[in-house]
Image (cartoon, grey):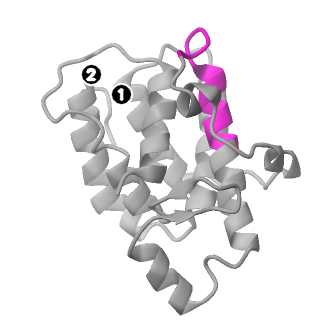
Amino acid sequence: MDTTHIQTSSQFRKFMIGIAQSQAKNYQGSLEEYLRSLLPLVEESKNLKASWGLFAELFIKAFSSVPDSFNEDWLNYKSPPMMIRMRQPAQKDGFEELREILFYQIADLHRMEQAGYFKSEEIMKELWFGAKNSPAGYKWSNFTPDSFLENMNYGLSEDSNVTECSWADLAIVLWLGQIYE
Protein backbone atom coordinates (compact mmCIF):
# COMPACT_ATOMS: atom_id res chain seq x y z
CA MET A 1 0.00 0.00 0.00
CA ASP A 2 1.18 3.44 -0.87
CA THR A 3 1.75 5.61 2.18
CA THR A 4 3.66 8.45 0.47
CA HIS A 5 0.53 10.62 0.39
CA ILE A 6 0.22 10.57 4.20
CA GLN A 7 1.64 13.85 5.41
CA THR A 8 -0.62 15.00 8.26
CA SER A 9 -1.86 13.44 11.48
CA SER A 10 -5.43 13.47 10.16
CA GLN A 11 -4.38 11.62 7.00
CA PHE A 12 -2.57 9.08 9.18
CA ARG A 13 -5.68 8.72 11.37
CA LYS A 14 -7.98 8.12 8.41
CA PHE A 15 -5.58 5.67 6.77
CA MET A 16 -5.03 3.67 9.96
CA ILE A 17 -8.75 3.45 10.78
CA GLY A 18 -9.24 2.01 7.28
CA ILE A 19 -6.43 -0.51 7.82
CA ALA A 20 -7.88 -1.47 11.22
CA GLN A 21 -11.26 -2.15 9.62
CA SER A 22 -9.81 -4.17 6.75
CA GLN A 23 -6.32 -5.67 6.90
CA ALA A 24 -6.15 -5.93 10.71
CA LYS A 25 -9.43 -7.88 10.88
CA ASN A 26 -7.86 -10.60 8.70
CA TYR A 27 -4.62 -10.80 10.69
CA GLN A 28 -4.29 -14.27 12.20
CA GLY A 29 -1.86 -13.45 15.03
CA SER A 30 -2.38 -11.98 18.48
CA LEU A 31 -1.78 -8.36 19.39
CA GLU A 32 1.43 -9.41 21.13
CA GLU A 33 2.66 -11.08 17.92
CA TYR A 34 1.72 -8.02 15.87
CA LEU A 35 3.68 -5.74 18.21
CA ARG A 36 6.62 -8.19 18.07
CA SER A 37 6.49 -7.78 14.28
CA LEU A 38 6.35 -4.00 14.56
CA LEU A 39 9.30 -3.72 16.97
CA PRO A 40 12.15 -4.70 14.59
CA LEU A 41 10.67 -2.51 11.85
CA VAL A 42 10.72 0.43 14.26
CA GLU A 43 14.29 -0.35 15.32
CA GLU A 44 15.43 -0.56 11.68
CA SER A 45 13.93 2.90 11.11
CA LYS A 46 15.71 4.63 13.99
CA ASN A 47 17.87 6.80 11.76
CA LEU A 48 15.03 7.86 9.47
CA LYS A 49 13.15 11.11 9.95
CA ALA A 50 9.88 10.45 11.77
CA SER A 51 6.83 11.13 9.60
CA TRP A 52 3.17 10.16 9.55
CA GLY A 53 3.74 8.33 6.26
CA LEU A 54 6.64 6.35 7.73
CA PHE A 55 4.52 5.40 10.75
CA ALA A 56 1.74 4.13 8.46
CA GLU A 57 4.28 2.14 6.43
CA LEU A 58 5.64 0.46 9.56
CA PHE A 59 2.16 -0.57 10.70
CA ILE A 60 1.39 -2.00 7.24
CA LYS A 61 4.68 -3.94 7.01
CA ALA A 62 4.09 -5.47 10.46
CA PHE A 63 1.15 -7.48 9.05
CA SER A 64 3.47 -9.44 6.76
CA SER A 65 6.57 -9.55 8.98
CA VAL A 66 7.53 -12.53 11.09
CA PRO A 67 7.25 -11.64 14.80
CA ASP A 68 10.47 -11.51 16.78
CA SER A 69 10.77 -14.26 19.37
CA PHE A 70 9.73 -13.19 22.83
CA ASN A 71 12.70 -11.90 24.82
CA GLU A 72 12.48 -12.70 28.54
CA ASP A 73 14.35 -9.44 29.28
CA TRP A 74 11.25 -7.56 28.17
CA LEU A 75 9.51 -8.76 31.34
CA ASN A 76 11.65 -6.17 33.16
CA TYR A 77 9.40 -3.52 31.58
CA LYS A 78 6.50 -3.31 34.01
CA SER A 79 5.21 0.15 33.18
CA PRO A 80 5.01 2.55 30.26
CA PRO A 81 7.80 5.10 29.81
CA MET A 82 8.07 7.99 32.24
CA MET A 83 6.88 10.51 29.62
CA ILE A 84 3.52 8.73 29.59
CA ARG A 85 3.20 7.89 33.29
CA MET A 86 4.29 11.32 34.53
CA ARG A 87 3.38 13.33 31.43
CA GLN A 88 6.95 14.47 31.04
CA PRO A 89 8.66 15.52 27.82
CA ALA A 90 10.38 12.83 25.80
CA GLN A 91 14.14 12.56 25.62
CA LYS A 92 15.44 14.08 22.36
CA ASP A 93 13.23 12.70 19.58
CA GLY A 94 11.39 10.15 21.72
CA PHE A 95 12.84 7.05 20.08
CA GLU A 96 13.85 5.48 23.41
CA GLU A 97 10.35 6.05 24.79
CA LEU A 98 8.92 4.40 21.68
CA ARG A 99 11.11 1.33 22.27
CA GLU A 100 10.11 1.29 25.95
CA ILE A 101 6.37 1.41 25.21
CA LEU A 102 6.75 -1.48 22.76
CA PHE A 103 8.81 -3.54 25.23
CA TYR A 104 6.30 -2.79 27.98
CA GLN A 105 3.21 -3.57 25.87
CA ILE A 106 4.66 -6.81 24.51
CA ALA A 107 5.69 -7.90 28.00
CA ASP A 108 2.35 -6.89 29.55
CA LEU A 109 0.36 -8.82 26.93
CA HIS A 110 2.68 -11.78 27.51
CA ARG A 111 2.06 -11.58 31.27
CA MET A 112 -1.69 -11.47 30.61
CA GLU A 113 -1.45 -14.56 28.40
CA GLN A 114 0.56 -16.39 31.07
CA ALA A 115 -2.02 -15.41 33.72
CA GLY A 116 -4.81 -16.92 31.60
CA TYR A 117 -6.52 -13.69 30.56
CA PHE A 118 -7.21 -14.99 27.06
CA LYS A 119 -7.99 -18.64 27.84
CA SER A 120 -11.67 -18.98 28.75
CA GLU A 121 -14.71 -17.75 26.86
CA GLU A 122 -16.09 -16.09 30.00
CA ILE A 123 -12.90 -14.08 30.56
CA MET A 124 -12.85 -13.07 26.89
CA LYS A 125 -16.42 -11.72 27.17
CA GLU A 126 -15.36 -9.70 30.20
CA LEU A 127 -12.39 -8.29 28.29
CA TRP A 128 -14.55 -7.21 25.35
CA PHE A 129 -17.02 -5.34 27.56
CA GLY A 130 -14.68 -3.06 29.42
CA ALA A 131 -11.17 -2.24 30.38
CA LYS A 132 -9.12 -4.67 32.41
CA ASN A 133 -6.01 -4.12 34.48
CA SER A 134 -3.03 -6.27 33.60
CA PRO A 135 -0.93 -8.13 36.19
CA ALA A 136 1.38 -5.07 36.10
CA GLY A 137 -1.60 -2.90 37.10
CA TYR A 138 -2.15 -0.90 33.93
CA LYS A 139 -5.41 -0.51 32.04
CA TRP A 140 -5.97 -2.33 28.75
CA SER A 141 -9.05 -1.77 26.61
CA ASN A 142 -8.00 -3.37 23.30
CA PHE A 143 -6.66 -6.87 22.86
CA THR A 144 -6.72 -7.51 19.11
CA PRO A 145 -4.78 -5.76 16.36
CA ASP A 146 -7.96 -4.38 14.76
CA SER A 147 -9.39 -2.80 17.94
CA PHE A 148 -5.92 -1.60 19.02
CA LEU A 149 -5.16 0.05 15.66
CA GLU A 150 -8.60 1.58 15.34
CA ASN A 151 -8.73 3.04 18.85
CA MET A 152 -5.16 4.37 18.85
CA ASN A 153 -6.29 6.92 16.28
CA TYR A 154 -9.21 8.45 18.13
CA GLY A 155 -6.86 10.62 20.14
CA LEU A 156 -5.81 12.30 16.88
CA SER A 157 -7.88 15.13 15.44
CA GLU A 158 -9.95 14.36 12.33
CA ASP A 159 -9.06 17.66 10.71
CA SER A 160 -5.54 18.39 11.89
CA ASN A 161 -3.06 19.62 9.31
CA VAL A 162 -0.09 18.96 11.60
CA THR A 163 2.75 17.59 9.50
CA GLU A 164 5.50 17.55 12.11
CA CYS A 165 5.83 14.51 14.36
CA SER A 166 8.39 12.64 16.39
CA TRP A 167 8.96 9.11 17.59
CA ALA A 168 7.41 10.24 20.88
CA ASP A 169 4.16 10.91 19.00
CA LEU A 170 4.16 7.29 17.85
CA ALA A 171 4.74 6.14 21.45
CA ILE A 172 1.70 8.15 22.55
CA VAL A 173 -0.39 6.71 19.71
CA LEU A 174 0.56 3.19 20.85
CA TRP A 175 -0.42 4.08 24.43
CA LEU A 176 -3.81 5.29 23.16
CA GLY A 177 -4.25 1.95 21.39
CA GLN A 178 -3.91 0.26 24.75
CA ILE A 179 -6.22 2.48 26.81
CA TYR A 180 -8.71 4.17 24.48
CA GLU A 181 -12.21 2.67 24.65
> What is the residue that sits farthest to the right in this orientation?
72
Give the magenta range.
89-103
Q: Determine which quarter of the picture holds residue 158.
A: top left
Quarter of the image for the C terminus: give it: bottom left
Q: Nearer the viewer, residue 84 or 157?
A: 84
Asked if 164 appears above or below 123 in the picture, the reply is above
Q: Is residue 37 magenta?
A: no
Q: What kind of residue is marked 1?
A: Gly
Residue 9: % across, % down: 27, 27
Q: Would residue 33 be seen by someone viewing this image from the given angle?
A: yes
Residue occupying the point 39% across, 17% down: 165
The numbered mark, 2 or 1, whose residue comes first in the sequence reads 2
Task: Locate residue 144 relative to residue 151 in the image: left or right.
Answer: right
Q: Which residue is mark 1?
A: 53
Residue occupying the point 21% across, 42% down: 14
Residue 70: % across, % down: 79, 55
Q: Nearer the viewer, residue 92 or 63?
A: 92
Residue occupying the point 63% across, 27% down: 82
Q: What kind of residue is marked 2?
A: Gln
Q: How many residues crowd mark 2 within 10 Å: few (<14), some (14–19), many (20+)?
A: some
Magenta span: chief secondary structure: helix
- Confirm or deny contact between disc 2 and disc 1 (CB under 8 A): yes
Asked if 59 appears above or below 163 in the picture, the reply is below
Q: Which residue is mark 2?
A: 7
Task: Locate residue 179 relative to residue 47 in the image: left or right.
Answer: left
